Image (spheres, grey):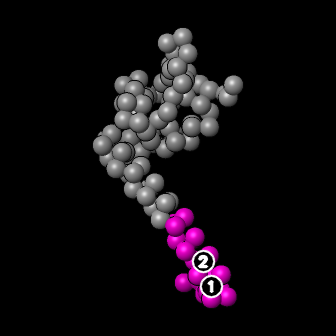
Amino acid sequence: MSERISREELVKIYNIEITFFDELVDSGLLNIQTENEILYLKYEDLPVFEKFANWHYDLEINLPGLEVIHDMLKKMEHLRQKNRELMNKLSAMSGGYEDI
């Protein structure tokens, strides 16, 4: 079983509103585990949670804004990966390429 932290512990440690956590889960921005009606977040997902909490509380970005930013960052990462693949193919075909 992977290491995890309960929703209640997160709320206390990070001093956030429980509704904020629930909204992240409801919007699909956080994946949780449920056991005996207790919600848990895997430790490996803590950086994602912390990023959302920082954006929301420090930068005052609302939930729709978090969703848009998250979606845009996923798309950017996908495009970076696609660009790497294409550059590798180009390099293989032409014997190399110069970095821009």
The x and y percentages for residue 30 are 47, 35
Q: Circle 1 sits on which residue?
A: 93
Residue range (magenta)? 80-100
- Specify the amino acid type for callout 2: Lys
The answer to the question of whether label 1 and label 2 lie on touching residues, with beta carbons closer than 8 A, is yes
Residue 22, image quadrant = top left
Residue 38 is labelled as none
Vertical order, 77 against 17 (above or below): below
On whether residue 32 falls in the magenta region, the answer is: no
Q: Is residue 89 magenta?
A: yes
Tell me the CA gap for discs 1 and 2.
6 Å
Q: Main secondary structure of the magenta part?
A: helix
Identify the residue at image location x=62%, y=37%.
44
Residue at label 2? 89
Report the amino acid beneath label 1: Met
Percent coordinates x, y for residue 12 in the rendering: 51, 22
Q: Is residue 55 above or below residue 18?
A: below
From the viewer's side, name the closer residue of 82 and 28: 82
Mark 1 secondary-structure assignment: helix
x and y, in percent, of residue 51 in the image: 49, 44
Vertical order, 50 against 19 (above or below): below
Q: Residues within 10 Å of mark 1 (few under 14, many from 20)?
A: few
Instruction: Name the quadrant of the C terminus.
Output: bottom right
Which one is in front, 15 or 69?
Answer: 69
Q: Residue at x 69, y 25 (%)?
A: 1
Determine whether the residue tagged by mark 2 lies in a helix, strand or loop.
Answer: helix
Q: Is residue 64 left or right of residue 16?
A: left
Q: Which image quadrant for residue 36?
A: top right
Measured as percent of width and height from the top left, residue 61 is found at 34, 44
User: In this rendering, does residue 13 appear at all?
Assistant: no
What residue sits 38% from the left and 41% below the top?
A: 56
Find the residue positioned furthest to the front. 93
